[in-house]
């Protein structure tokens, strides 16, 4: 019975790792394509019309969000039960609430006179910062992949915002995806653990 339980746990863990690796790859592609197109549309000699760049960016983010939701639904039915399932559900909702709150905050700032040029720099910076802070929640479970991504996203948000437009789009298009792909490779090869490490005491 113990061997059966251990085998099931290993299978569940393997599925979760594969799902998370694919999820990171999808988001890396969304950032690379979406922000890359925005950069190409904002250069002094634009290669992509701005009217086409923003729909492409929006489509990339929507696809990644839909994939994330589908991954979450699959994970919820992949053998996770009890406190871990509730914990994951609450953490997932915290992402939704944080993103909605950031959107409302930025919309309010724009409503009271935030200049368009500043908004173009501030919008991605705020969202990248929020993502980084949420990923720092990995510290609660000693989850190194999440914490490392959190540190990277916070650094990227600060550096990209400081550099300003249109270079900030290039920073998001390059550094963010590289960080996600590095973590995905390390997870896939078993170098980094996905599951939080629990105390044995």
Image (cartoon, rainbow, N blue to C red):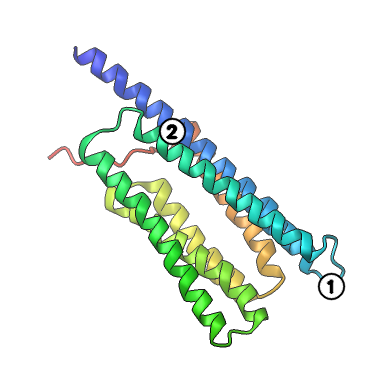
* Quadrant of the drawing holding the N terminus: top left
Mark 2 lies on residue: 17
- Classed neighbour count for the residue bearing mark 1: other residues with Cα under 10 Å, few (<14), some (14–19), many (≥20): few
Is 187 on the left or on the right of 41, as rendered?
A: left
Residue that protrudes farthest toward the bottom in the picture: 113
Residue 164: quadrant of the picture:
bottom right
Q: Is residue 173 left or right of residue 14?
A: right
* Percent x, y of residue 75: 39, 34
- Residue in the image at 84% along x and 72% along y: 44
Label 2 CA crowd tier, 10 Å (few <14, some 14–19, many 20+): many
Query: Could you give the CA–CA distance between mark 2 and mark 1, rounded to whole angstroms?
Result: 42 Å
Q: Residue at x 66, y 80 (%)?
A: 116
Query: Does 159 sit above or below residue 196?
Result: below
Quarter location, residue 80: top left
Residue at 41 percent across and 50 percent down: it is: 146
Residue 122 % position (x, y): 57, 74
Where is residue 30 drawn, in percent x and y?
A: 63, 49
The mark that comes first in sequence, 2 or 1, is: 2
Q: Is label 2 in contact with label 1 (beta carbons under 8 Å)? A: no
* Relative depth, front residue between 119 and 157: 119
Q: Report the front residue among 122 and 50.
A: 50
Identify the element where label 1 is drawn. loop
Q: Give the side of residue 187 with respect to residue 179, left or right.
A: left
157, above or below 184, in the image = below
Residue on which the image places disc 1: 44
Q: Secondary structure at mark 2?
A: helix
Q: Residue at x 39, y 61 (%)?
A: 97
């Amino acid at each position: 019975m113990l061997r059966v339980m251990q085998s099931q746990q290993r299978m569940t863990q393997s599925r979760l790792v594969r799902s998370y690796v694919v999820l990171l790859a999808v988001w890396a592609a969304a950032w690379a394509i979406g922000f890359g197109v925005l950069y190409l549309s904002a250069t002094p000699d634009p290669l992509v019309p701005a009217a086409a760049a923003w729909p492409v960016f929006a489509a990339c983010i929507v696809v990644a969000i839909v994939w994330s939701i589908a991954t979450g639904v699959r994970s919820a039915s992949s053998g996770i039960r009890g406190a871990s399932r509730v914990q994951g559900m609450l953490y997932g909702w915290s992402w939704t609430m944080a993103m909605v709150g950031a959107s409302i905050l930025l919309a309010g700032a724009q409503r009271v006179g935030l200049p368009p040029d500043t908004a173009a720099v501030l919008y991605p910076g705020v969202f990248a910062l929020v993502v980084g802070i949420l990923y720092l929640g990995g510290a609660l479970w000693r989850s190194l992949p999440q914490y490392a991504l959190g540190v990277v996203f916070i650094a990227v948000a600060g550096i990209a915002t400081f550099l300003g437009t249109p270079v900030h789009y290039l920073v998001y298009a390059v550094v963010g995806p590289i960080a996600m792909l590095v973590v995905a490779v390390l997870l896939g090869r078993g170098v980094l653990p996905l599951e939080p490490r629990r105390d044995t005491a």
